[in-house]
Amino acid sequence: MVLSLPYRAPVAQRPAWVRGSAHPAVGLLRRPSLVAAATILLVCVPTGEKDVSAAVHITAADVASGLLVLLLAVDLVRGRRIELSRPVAVLFGAVTVAGAVATITSVDPQLSVSGFVRQEQIFVLVPLAVLAALRDRTDLRLVLGSFVLAALIEGAVGAEQYLTRTGASYTGQPIRAVGTFGVLDVMAMSGVVSFGLLAALGLGLIERQRVWLRRTLLASAAFLAFPLAVSFSRGSWIATAVGVTVLLLKADARLALRWAGVGLAAAVVLFGALGTGASGAGALGAGDGGIAQRLSSIGTVSGGNEDHSVSDRYDLWATARAIWADHPATGAGPKSFYQLRDSHAPLRLSSGSDTAGAGSGFQREPLLSPHNMYFLVLSDQGLLGFTAYGTLFLALLLGCLRRRGPAGPVVAGLLCWVLVDFLYADIGGTTTVLTSVILGLAAWSALPADQAGQDRAPALEATA
């Protein structure tokens, strides 16, 4: 069953000013995916120093995403019909209802209103606007290509920071690649680079006619492995490994096995060259915090052997569970975690994390969230919100894995990256809006073709 909004009239039936006008606004209405692409690229615009504890942060990418939603509203007024399957409408509607209920019952409703608005932007409005903006393969390639371009920009900056030792401080050395985001958003570059790597790999595998483009995309994916490595983000490494595995398996299982061997060999060379151990403190070494040592630390995150950042994360998760225990049904309300943190946290929890480098002096960044999206939803919105979000994520994941379409393997890989990353991270920072775009891509890919009302040709076959 389909929820129908007024259908966009054929070109011949549209007003003359729309058919013949060269006005930029009309061009955007014809292809709003241009704004979605701009949203992705604008995350690269530096935001400068900011107060991370401020209630509201508005970036250039947020403004572009708002314009995308506005274009959707204008398109609806013009008479375009967007057909959403009932499951999609129910799933996104449930997230809205859960957030509204949590805001009304919040311990501080006034504070929670801004959190509810942000939730609607990230998890409902922008994804649905992206879903509506994707009308053909050109739109899809435009959006995915923007992920690649943004990643190349950030990857180039990050690689330069590592090689010239002008990055963020890591193990006492200014070698951590953070791109244009600075030390207060230290994880952002690794996310952008990961998305671009997955998009480049996916687009390269399905490119069959233009050999030069195929080689360029695959070479871009290979290059992006370097800035991802020197971001020293264990979470992004894990999420990217999962995303690439899902992408390759969905594209071609035999291809996945072949690429797994190539990837393993490349990883051995890369981490062997960069992770030079305790004595390698040169341009390609990370001293005591070499990449190889950072990689090996993934397996020592329990039993008292974890580093301080990991133990803090465990304490934040315990804090979120304690807050949820006091507000089990509807949670404490959006943005209430920081307000209630100190009254529920273990005594050993740090007051913040130390940051320095990349053009900034020493700063202490407060721990404002549990660094786990699922625990954040549980503490802020209780079982009601956890059920709504969990059902949405699961439905999108199963739909992307089950159905074939032009979004195909790459969107499944991107969605898996986000869902895995949510295990040890949550929304926040300049690149949060990219999560919205990926959720919109996932909804577009998971939507049944016979209910979409859009041009969805069969998936392009991946080639070796």
Image: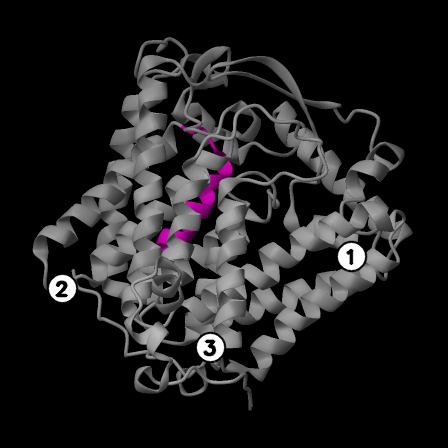
At 66% from the left and 63% from the top, the residue drawn is: 389
Does residue 205 sit above or below 281 in this rendering? below
Task: Give yes or no for contact between labels 1 and 2 (Cβ–Cβ under 8 Å).
Answer: no
Q: Is 330 left, or right, of 263 in this rendering?
A: right
Q: Nearer the viewer, residue 303 or 150?
A: 150
At 87% from the left and 53% from the top, the residue drawn is: 106
Q: Amino acid at mark 2?
A: Arg
Q: Nearer the viewer, residue 331 or 12?
A: 12
Q: Amino acid at mark 3?
A: Leu
Q: Is residue 305 at all visible to an observer of this figure?
A: no
- Point out residue 25 in the picture as x, y percentages from the top left corner: 40, 60
| Earlier-in-chain disc, 1 versus 2 | 2
Q: Amino acid at mark 1?
A: Gln
Quarter of the image for residue 309 reads top right
Q: Which residue is mark 3?
A: 447
Instruction: Calculate the distance from the C-alpha at mark 2 to the C-alpha at mark 3.
Output: 26 Å
Q: Which residue is mark 1?
A: 381
- Point out residue 197 in the picture as x, y percentages from the top left corner: 32, 46
Prevailing secondary structure of the magenta residues: helix
Span colored in magenta: 231-245
- Quadrant in the picture for the N terminus: bottom right
Q: Is 440 left, or right, of 365 in this rendering?
A: left
| Earlier-in-chain disc, 2 versus 3 | 2
Q: Secondary structure at mark 3?
A: loop
- Quadrant in the picture for the C terminus: bottom left
